[in-house]
Image (cartoon, rainbow, N blue to C red):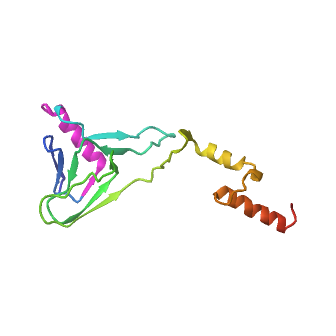
Amino acid sequence: MATTVTINGITKVIKLQNCSYITVQELYSRWKIWSQLDDNLKYPQAFRTVGGDPTVTGEFLGTTYFVLNNWVIEPCSSSHTLTVVGNIFTDDGDSPFQQPVGNYEIMIYNQFSNLSTVHEVSTTGTTLTATEIRDTIMDTDLSTLTDNTTFGGYVANKLLTVAKFIGLS
């Protein structure tokens, strides 16, 4: 049975009907078509995307979709398992899905792609890359690390103890 999607700009609900499987790309495409009908552009934007850029010949960076402006996706009003294929998040980290009114048991199974994630590390307002962090650790003079209350001091103390034990110092 084909998936029907109903979009309500006033309530900001994207309602799925007859659905046990949908791709995030399909949701996004349905919203884009809807937003261009009549005067639907007056409603707040429901999605933004990142990715899709070419990487190497024939390959592209996976696309991730973000649900915006308090829009929600509401599964069918029945007990079921909904499989959602694709990366979908909200900007505030909440679930993009809401439970329909009624006493339904709904399991949502997300099939995310294995995109790489990068974590930013900042110290004293300066953002360091992974290479800079590695180089800082590898280039630190061990003789300056004598405080056992820090990880570096602890490791340096153990290395010096091992060096003394095997007669290197």
**Residue displayed at 12% across by 59% down:** 101
Q: Position of residue 85 (x, y in %)?
A: 32, 54
Q: Is residue 154 above or below residue 125?
A: below
Q: Position of residue 158 (x, y in %)?
A: 73, 64
Q: In this view, does 128 lie above or below 111?
A: above
Residue 32 is left or right of residue 144, and the answer is left
**Residue displayed at 31% across by 39% down:** 48
145 in magenta: no
> Which of the pair 46/110 is nearer the observer?
46
Give, as a single range, the part of the protein colored magenta. Answer: 21-41
Q: Dividing the picture into quarters, in which one does residue 19 lie?
A: bottom left
**Residue displayed at 38% across by 44% down:** 63
Q: Is residue 9 above or below residue 166?
A: above
Identify the image quadrant of the N terminus: bottom left
27 in magenta: yes
> Which of the pair 134/26 is nearer the observer?
134
Q: Position of residue 46 (x, y in %)?
A: 24, 41
| Main secondary structure along the magenta-highlighted residues | helix
**Residue displayed at 19% across by 56% down:** 75
